[in-house]
């Protein structure tokens, strides 16, 4: 799919993929991939940059999501490819959710963000599939 837009507009395309149906929790496993342009006031050191960005993401999620808990954080900013992973739990009125957000630095100084979601208790079984999906990701 493509669409012509004015030259001053930004492409905020999203890739949304979902399992064929819900798991036992009633939540349909899914992955949403977006592009993010970090704010200009982030530190220049890659490790500090990622940690500051994650701190802000966590603060925003904690304000907006019921029962929010940061479960795990991993940052690897060595070499050419910045990578960070953030695993969180939270709930809405329908279900308890687990999400893993994966941030990968892109060539323009921004990030590709992949958010994998399942019902709590279902994530560990789905994680190998999510990892395989991420390994196959390409930008054309």
Image: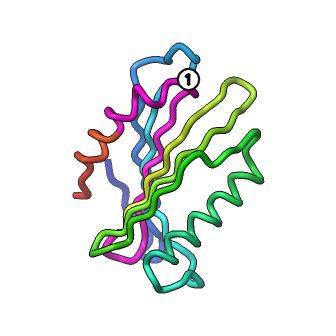
Quick one: label 1, few (<14), some, or many (20+) residues within 10 Å?
some
Residue 94 location (% of width, % of height): 70, 23
Residue 63 location (% of width, % of height): 77, 53
- Coloration of the structure image: rainbow
128 magenta-colored: yes
Residue visible at 32% across and 34% down?
128
Quadrant of residue 19 within the rendered picture: top left
Residue 71 or residue 44, whichever sits in front: 71
Task: Please give left or right for residue 57 compared with residue 37 in the image.
Answer: right
Residue 81 location (% of width, % of height): 30, 69
Q: The C terminus appears in which quarter of the rendering?
A: bottom left
Which residue occupies the extreme top position in the image?
A: 24
State how many labels appear. Answer: 1
Quadrant of residue 79 within the rendered picture: bottom left
Residue 124 or residue 19, whichever sits in front: 124
Q: Report the magenta residues as a range.
A: 105-130
Residue 16 location (% of width, % of height): 42, 40
Task: Please give left or right for residue 40 compared with residue 111 in the image.
Answer: right
Q: Which residue is mark 1?
A: 27
Residue visible at 48% across and 86% down?
44
- Badge 1 marks a residue whose secondary structure is loop
66 magenta-colored: no
Q: Is residue 118 above or below residue 15?
A: above
Residue visible at 58% across and 17% down?
26
Q: Is residue 37 above or below residue 18?
A: below
Residue 99 or residue 9, whichever sits in front: 99
Q: Is residue 127 above or below residue 108?
A: above
Residue visible at 39% across and 66% down?
76
């Amino acid at each position: 799919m493509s669409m012509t837009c004015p030259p001053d507009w930004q492409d905020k395309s999203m890739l949304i993929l979902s399992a064929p149906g819900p798991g036992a929790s009633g939540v349909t496993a899914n992955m949403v991939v977006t592009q993010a342009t970090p704010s200009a006031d982030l530190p220049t050191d890659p490790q500090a940059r990622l940690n500051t960005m994650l701190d802000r993401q966590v603060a925003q999620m904690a304000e907006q999501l019921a029962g929010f808990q940061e479960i795990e954080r991993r940052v690897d900013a060595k070499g050419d490819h910045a990578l960070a992973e953030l695993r969180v739990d939270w709930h809405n009125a329908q279900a308890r959710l687990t999400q893993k957000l994966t941030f990968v630095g892109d060539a323009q100084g921004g990030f590709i963000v992949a958010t994998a979601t399942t019902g709590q208790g279902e994530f560990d079984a789905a994680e190998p599939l999510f990892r395989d999906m991420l390994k196959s990701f390409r930008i054309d």
